[in-house]
Amino acid sequence: MRIKDLAVCLLVSLLLVGVPVAPAQAQSCQFVLGFATLHNLIPQIVGQCLENEHHNPINGDGLQMTTNGLLVWRKSDNFTAFTDGFRSWVNGPFGVQTRLNSQRFFWEQNPDKLPIVPAPVAGDRCHTAGLSLTLAGSEGAAGTIFDTFRFVNNLSVPCTFFGFVGAQMLDAQNNSVKTQVIRGGDFLTNLPGPAPFIVPAGGSAEFTLSWSDVPVGNETTCPKATQLAVTPPDEFVPVIVPVSLAPCNAGTVHVSAVRPAS
């Protein structure tokens, strides 16, 4: 090889040193359903997708990484949000709202009892974010089960209850189980009807849920649930409580009005 040709080869080699090899193109991805809706509302904040939506096999929650953060869909309450790791843009009953990850809106689930924005007002309706719920007791008679559930006001101010709860049975993966809710009736007629009352800070309120464990007609099995999603009166999002339920008659449950705790 001539000296001139050798010099050209060396020059080309030197020019190629440090030039990165273009990575293989990432698999195409897209936003769908609720994630597509939220992305279209705030495209500059969400950014572009880095992967397709995937689901947590334990609870069914949806997740999708983007160039700016993470999209989240919570199956238990149909909650859709985007977070950059510090703030969250939540698409809820009042449109897209922004808060810190260390805060919750009054209508959100709040099992960790994080600060609520805006700050609760004394005497306002008892909102989901300020409440926790437990099964206070269960008893049965003549094929009917009576479960008493207790709300606790976790706020530092009093709140007001009035009316009936909503209820939806769930399995362990937060899938809906067939549920038919009837307000009052059945063996709950001896309990008080809806009337407004105030729950002090740290105070409690109750409601009773009754159901039959005796199959009706051609029923061979009754719907079974391991969780109950309970929406407080006039609220948007439920509080989730673990409980074993198997109401017959196509998942029929009767609920009483919320009343002061006994």
Image: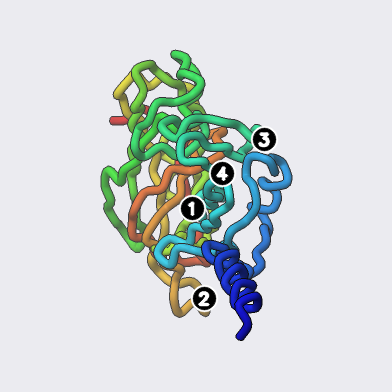
Q: Earlier in the sequence, mark 4 or mark 3?
A: 4
Q: Position of residue 155 (x, y in %)?
A: 36, 23
* Image depth: mark 3 or mark 2 in front: 3
Q: Amino acid at mark 2?
A: Gly
Q: Is residue 111 above or below residue 219?
A: above
Q: Amino acid at mark 3?
A: Gly
| Separation (CA) of disc 2 from disc 1 | 32 Å
Q: Position of residue 240 (x, y in %)?
A: 41, 48
Q: Position of residue 253 (x, y in %)?
A: 47, 54
Residue 250 visible: yes
Q: Amino acid at mark 4?
A: Phe
| Separation (CA) of disc 2 from disc 4 | 48 Å
**Residue 258 falls left or right of residue 30:** left
Crowding at dot 2, Cα within 10 Å, few <14 / some 14-19 / many 20+, comes out as few
Q: Earlier in the sequence, mark 4 or mark 1?
A: 1
Q: Earlier in the sequence, mark 2 or mark 1?
A: 1
The residue pinned by badge 1 equals 76
Please report the residue visible at 40 percent of the width from the left and 26 percent of the height from the top. 115
Tags 4 and 3 in contact by the CB under 8 Å rule?
Answer: no
Q: Amino acid at mark 1?
A: Ser
Looking at the image, which residue sits at the far right?
Answer: 40
Quadrant that contains the C terminus: top left
Q: Circle 3 sits in a helix, a strand or a loop, which is it?
A: strand
The residue pinned by badge 3 equals 95
| Separation (CA) of disc 3 from disc 2 | 45 Å
Q: Earlier in the sequence, mark 3 or mark 2?
A: 3
Q: Position of residue 68 (x, y in %)?
A: 57, 45
